[in-house]
Image (tube, helix red, strand yellow):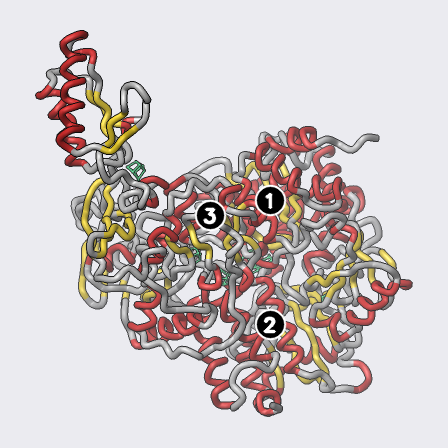
Amino acid sequence: MAEPGNDTLVEHWKDEPAPLLPLLHAFHERDGYLSEEALRAVSRGLRIPIADLFGTVTFYHHFSRDAAGLDRPRVCNGPVCSMRGAEVLLASLRAAGHDPMTMPCPGRCDEPVPVIHRGTVLTGRTAGTLVSGPSPLPPVPPDGVEECVFAGIRAPGRPTLAGYRSQGGYEALEQAVTGMTPAEVVDVIDASGLAGRGGAGFPTGRKWRAVADAPGEPKTIVCNADEGEPGCFKDRVLMDHDPHGTIEGMALAAYATGAVRGFIYLRYEYPETCDILEGAIAAAAAAGLLGDGILGTDFRFDLMVRRGAGAYICGEETSLLNSLEGGHPFPRNRPPFPVTHGYENLPTVVNNVETLASAPPILVHGAEWYRGLGRADHAGTKVISLSGDIARPGNYEVPIGLPLRELLHGWAGGPPGGRAVQAVTMAGLSGGFLAGADLDVTLDEPSIRSKGSFLGAGGIMVFDDSRDMIRVTRESMEFFAEESCGKCFPCRIGTQRLVERLEGQGPRAVDAWVDEVVDLNEVMKKTSACGLGQAAPLLTESLIRYFPDRVRAHVEKG
Amino acid sequence: MKRNGTPSTNGKGVQLTMTLDGEKVAFTRGETVYEVAERHQKEIPTLCYDPRLEPFGGCRLCIVELEGARNPVASCTMKAEPGMRVRTRTAALEVQRRILMEMVASENRDTDVDPMHGYASQEMAELLDRYDARTGRFEGALSGESRPDDDNPFIKRDYENCISCYRCVRVCAEQEGDYAISVMNRGFHTQITTEFGGLLKDSACTFCGQCIQTCPTGALGDLKALANKDVPGETETTRTICPYCGVGCTVDVMTRGEKIVGVLPAMDGPANEGALCVKGQFAFDFVGHPDRLATPFIREEKSGQLRPASWDEALDFAAGKLRKVVKDHGRRAIYGIASGRAPHEAAYMMQRFIRAGLGTNHIDNCSRA
Ligand SMILES: Cc1cc2nc3c(=O)[nH]c(=O)nc-3n(C[C@H](O)[C@H](O)[C@H](O)COP(=O)(O)O)c2cc1C
Ligand code: SF4
Ligand code: SF4
Ligand code: SF4
Ligand code: FES
Ligand code: FES
């Protein structure tokens, strides 16, 4: 079959919602890169000034502007994989005649080292042993622990519509659209205490109510499946093995808020997940669970997947919205917030995958049930992605309030080889490190925030006592420097200066070094325009707090 | 340009107020905290701000403390709300601003540039002074790649002095509507670019020069004015109107002694609000150009050759010919066109001459084109 021409591709997408990213992907996949001719065709077709389009394309890590750039294997050099032989894998790919490039963590930290090659995720340690396969299912929790989002995920056939329905799937939606008012659905979510699982922890019921109450139509539900935080791979397992859970959650959010369209903004690094989601959406639509007249009512909801192209900041909700709209993905200034001025400046729910996937079980079992899943006063559960120096890495759905050490040692077997935990990261990388006595926290925001960190999206990377914490911090800071969008001064310059200081540049006396680094930390935390720049300095702050001797040795080594 | 109207009310006749550094002040709905503070002479520092553009929120120098907010907020993007309590100049804010200035100075090759670069080119240097920023702190890589290969005669693209405030990109889009330049890459590697990184002449740029005039560091420079940077004497500016066309842009012409050394757009010009086009901005060097005619010439009827003449002779010659045309064909046979390159006073005289002197309304100016 002949390749589709430029005009065919442009015609196909130009009147679709949020057309820029899919159209660019279509050209990228057809040609193996984004040529000047392709960009000029897109610019004309979508009426985007060519200079803007060019600048925006260069923002995304995975769009290649060089011929055959798509052929280059992309190898994770994230904090886990860099300890697990990313360099060896790169060298072996080179030896095998490839021209590999590195990429930040693609969310497969439980199976290092991942490589993305032409739309397939492979894992392995050398070029010759790379294999593709489904992402790992979550390990079975200890006896007596009740799960919410993972409760049915290990059942065979769960990803199919029939399998999902055989376990009671879409009953929550049916119950809602046939027997509840939208406000009643919001009330249940509100009463459950469910808070955002994407990082910021905003109460979900309040968000839905704000969108329901906001003037302006049409309203939109955006599922944030960008999962760009290194050390986080929980949304992937939810979408790969239980796609209908997220879809049903989005439909519930739509019913509760009066939204009629939805997007799943899926990170580029999850190509197989894209196929799974699109298959599940088609199956749900065919069964009358999406589209017009859902379940025989006049409720209507259209759902589409849009793929990112490699930019961590596009997980920040306002940057995500700009990316969806085809603009330059700088975060927006807030207020106004997406609940009133979201996609196309209209009321929009942006929720994380895990948040949305929690809604159906909450509706079926009730708010009280969900609240009761947490320990002590804490409501509900949180999926923790655990990786690094740990015997059983993977996704664990823990009761909120579980002691960290219980998860590390009791559930996941502690560090292998009889080593001790030197430090763990929190919130993927964004929470910086916890170490020493602070490892006694419980897994809930108040406890972790009291140590100057936060739980966030729930990625925890473990570093045993053999690891060089300066190197870990430097590589982690390189991630933030690489991903800083460049909009605001403190983050754009600060991440770079911190990397340089962790590389051994900057003052050679420890007091002067610390003085500069503390100033950078403080100004970034206080004045950065978004969460990236506010969080990045937690790495250096906690490094100085827990490892002052390592800092001294690093600065004074000459 | 945003104009601040009279303070508005909440619809029930109660004036909207907020507290600014302990003082209750009135504001108009839609005003930003920065705009309110400006009206009260708070002199909040800014680098990414241009009152003509949508607020951007990049430089973070305009931060203020807002009661109830965890972190300082950017006053340029924050709309004033009734009951807000804002502090514009606490010790903590001043320290943060100083560090921000030290950070931004650390990425540039020069922080002290010739004012002939452009209207806003001293903004960064002035703030470095005001905050007594310690140079040499946060030493590290410099950002931005200059484009000495761009040999256009108007705009110097010296991005080694760029601080990624994107005022140039925004003015090009929002004021000029050209969308000729944009931001490529991200983080520390952001770079102002045209489509595919090419030269300005191959882009949608119309060389209006607005990017130059909003650039706060001199990363963009007015090459026509910079050519005169060593002309001796103090720079004087004279407010006038661009003669080239009917828009009537207000300009401040810079002179040193007898020489025009550059043109600055008037930010308060009612027709242009700081905008100019390539002619008004750059086309002034004909005034002192060595190729300019220094005496009148008369074209010899037989040979068709031009020969120098005295003013008296030339004027008599012209008067004679004009009289003959009027006599043979009537006064309406004459049509006068004044040059856009002549001073306004000359254009006025020409118009009087045609109307009052010859008695016809057939008078025009090339600037109507
Ligand atoms: C730099 C940055 C990256 C983020 N990345 C993600 C992400 O990948 N996925 C996500 O759900 N939220 C991410 N967030 C949080 C979102 O901005 C937003 O709070 C969230 O999607 C809201 O959904 P929730 O309330 O269900 O958590 C990120 C925030 C920041 C500042
Ligand atoms: S904090 Fe960083 S990522 Fe966020 S807006 Fe500023 S530069 Fe961009
Ligand atoms: S060239 Fe000047 S105006 Fe443009 S971004 Fe750089 S510093 Fe700002
Ligand atoms: S010629 Fe250009 S600068 Fe002069 S008045 Fe007209 S538009 Fe303005
Ligand atoms: S997959 Fe390599 S660090 Fe996450
Ligand atoms: S002036 Fe407000 S952030 Fe730059």
Establish if A529 lies above or below B249. below
Which residue is drawn at the image coordinates 59% and 47% (left, top)?
Answer: B196
Query: In this view of the protein, which residue sits in the foreground, A384 or A452?
Result: A452
The image position of residue A377, as x and y in percent, is: 55, 71
Q: Looking at the picture, do discs 1 and 2 lie on one chain?
A: yes
Establish if A198 lies above or below B265. below
The image position of residue A125, as x and y in percent, is: 85, 68
Q: CA distance from mark 1 to mark 2?
A: 38 Å
Confirm or deny contact between disc 3 and disc 2 (CB under 8 A): no
Give the number of the disc on residue B224: none
Confirm or deny contact between disc 1 and disc 3 (CB under 8 A): no
- Per the image, label 3 sits on a secondary structure element best described as loop
Which residue is drawn at the image coordinates 51% and 69% (left, top)?
Answer: B142
Which residue is drawn at the image coordinates 59% and 79% (left, top)?
Answer: A502
Mark 1, chain letter? A
Residue that carries the numbered disc 2 in the rendered image: A477
Give the number of the disc on residue B152: 3
Q: Is residue A224 left or right of residue A217?
A: right
Circle nearer the N terminus (1, 2): 1
The image position of residue B63, as x and y in percent, is: 35, 65
